[in-house]
Image (tube, rainbow, N blue to C red):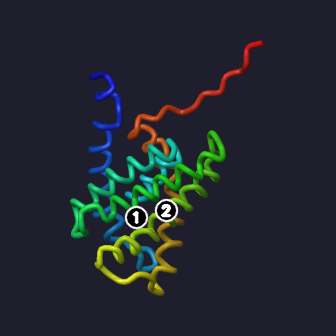
Amino acid sequence: MRNVLLGPLLRLGPVGITALSIQRVVFGAHPLFDVRLQFVLALVVAAGVGGGSDTGAIAGFVLGLMYDLSGNTPLGLTALAYGFAGMTAGYVRRFTPDPQWWLAAAFAFIGAAVGETAVPFTQYLTGESGWVTDRLFLIVPVVAGAAAVLSPALMPVGRWMMGVKRKTWKAMVE
């Protein structure tokens, strides 16, 4: 029972609903270069960078599922793309145990670019829309750059949301 109360199950819902609200109200109404920034994707890749590939995949799938339920996309479409983004961000994080803020931002950029590229691919697989358009070459760098800028501030939230403790370094005893 203690693991259920202290684990990510109870934290993921309220944080996800808050992130979706910020996504819809703030970032949905104020596009940058005619591109809507993806705040939920930035939170997913920040959780992946902060906790690893498993944590990022779980956060991406759950938050993507919440995104699908709140919008008009087919159920699981965004969940698959965001899960892949969180997993990628966590996977590239494994090259360093505790990345500095600029390295975490670079890992978040990579994860967000993969996740935002995965959205049209999954839409193509389900027959929603076309695959590569000229607009994709504008959308992916803008969304990934915004995720890189937001990720140092969102990493503590992502760690807390997923129940990940920061690694502590101890001196070896002889």
Locate the N terminus and report the quarter of the image it occupies. top left
Please tell me which residue lies in front, 36 or 121. 121
- Eye-nearest disc, 1 or 2: 2
Q: Quadrant of residue 20?
A: bottom left
Mark 1 vs 2: CB contact within 8 A: yes
- Residue at mark 1: 38
Query: What is the secondary structure assignment of the residue under circle 1?
Result: loop
Percent of width and height locating residue 23: 33, 61
Looking at numbered disc 1 in the image, what kind of residue is underneath it? Gln
Residue 168 vs 69, above or below: the answer is above
Question: Vertical placement of 15 versus 41: above or below?
Answer: above
Q: Residue at x 42, y 53 (%)?
A: 44
Instruction: Identify the disc placed on residue 112.
Output: 2
Q: Mark 2 or mark 1, which is nearer the start of the sequence? A: 1
The one of 167 and 55 positioned closer to us in this rendering:
55
Quadrant location of the C terminus in the rendered image: top right
Residue 67: x %, y % from top left: 28, 59
Identify the residue at horizontal 60%, vertical 45% (top origin). 94
Badge 2 local density, few (<14 within 10 Å), some, or many (20+)? many
- Which residue occupies the foreground of this view, 170 or 26? 170
Answer with left or right where residue 33 lies relative to residue 69: right
Give the percent coordinates (x, y) of residue 13.
Answer: 27, 44
Residue 129, percent from left and from top: 32, 81
